[in-house]
Amino acid sequence: MNITMRQFQIFEAVAQHLSYTRAADLLYLSQPAVSMQIKQLESEVGMPLFERLGKKLFLTDAGQELLIYARNISQQLLELDDVLDEIRGGERGRLTIAVATTANYFALKLLGEFYKRFSGTVINFDVTNRESLLNHLNDNTADMVIMGRPPEGMDVEATPFLDNPLVVIAPKEHRLAREKNIPLSVLQQETFIMREHGSGTRIAMERFFEQSGYSISSVMEMSSNEAINQAVEAGLGLGIVSRHTLELELALGRLAVLDVELFPIMRNWYLVHRKGKRLTALMESFKDLVIDETSTILKS
Ligand code: PGA
């Protein structure tokens, strides 16, 4: 196959915005120039990459596959750029970090500290759930990921650096708020507000109940910890969240952490990157800061 970098770049822009016009604008090209490059790329690939249904443009299966590779190659080129910069002794560097929604409560503090030390860094930061973090690792679209459990079946280096206890929360005045060692069977009679499927918190919680032989029912699903905390406070049900999400609520006395048997569910936060990934000095510095200094930074 004879594909040029320029074609990849144009393809990525069209695929991202699903619009020839928008891609042309972004790349300062004419719309016919963009169409021509995509046509050439399609003839190289031997299959259409886009299909138009009504007014909308969609990626075909081949297009979706090509997009994964195109992004990977772009990421690799950016890495090459950084490596070359380093060799030139340049100060500039780039860091792409993706963190679990729940880790965002402390990750920004770590990034803030890092930025103080390496202010020339351009940081790309994505906050998302576990499922998307796995995609980031798989597609090499993040240098490093902070997540609640390293992926199985993927060649990664994962270092635990902070604990992540999951606790049961209730409104301050809930009748269970003053009970001690509440049996799991009592929780079965309550309704819960849960995180969405794909969330690490949700998976850990489901595993816990599966192993303990109990099950709990949900009244609602939410993809934000803040929303769960607020819904619990409003009396819509109980919740199971990471203690990291509760700093403010507990300080303001808005919620109670229930004393439930076998709780908290003890988990860890891991810094994860693909094995064999070429880490620039900047990435190494970030890794060192997270692994060695998180506890100190979070206390400060
Ligand atoms: P999440 O957190 O629930 O925000 O996806 C990740 C995890 O705890 O594994």
Image: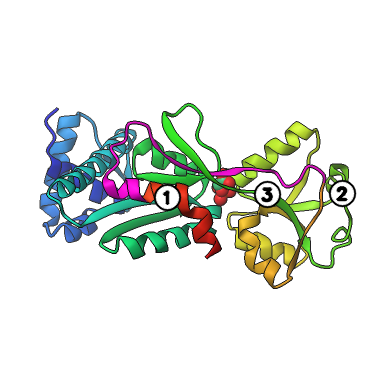
Query: Is 280 positioned to the left or the right of 298 in the image?
Result: left
Residues tagged 2 and 3 counted as in contact (Cβ below 8 A):
no
The residue carrying mark 3 is 166
Q: Tell me the residue at 14%/55% (across/down).
A: 31
Image coordinates of residue 254 in percent, x first then y, are 73, 70
62 in relation to 91, above or below: above
Q: Cβ of disc 2 within 8 Å of ligand 1?
A: no
Image coordinates of residue 230 in percent, x first then y, are 68, 66
Q: Cβ of disc 3 within 8 Å of ligand 1?
A: yes
The residue carrying mark 2 is 182
Tell which circle, 2 or 3, labels the residue nearer the N-terminal end.
3
Query: Is 286 positioned to the left or the right of 33 in the image?
Result: right
Tell which circle, 1 or 2, labels the residue nearer the N-terminal end.
1
Say which mark, if any, is on residue 221.
none
Image coordinates of residue 280 in percent, x first then y, are 27, 44
Residue 117, quarter of picture: bottom left
Q: Is residue 146 visible?
A: yes
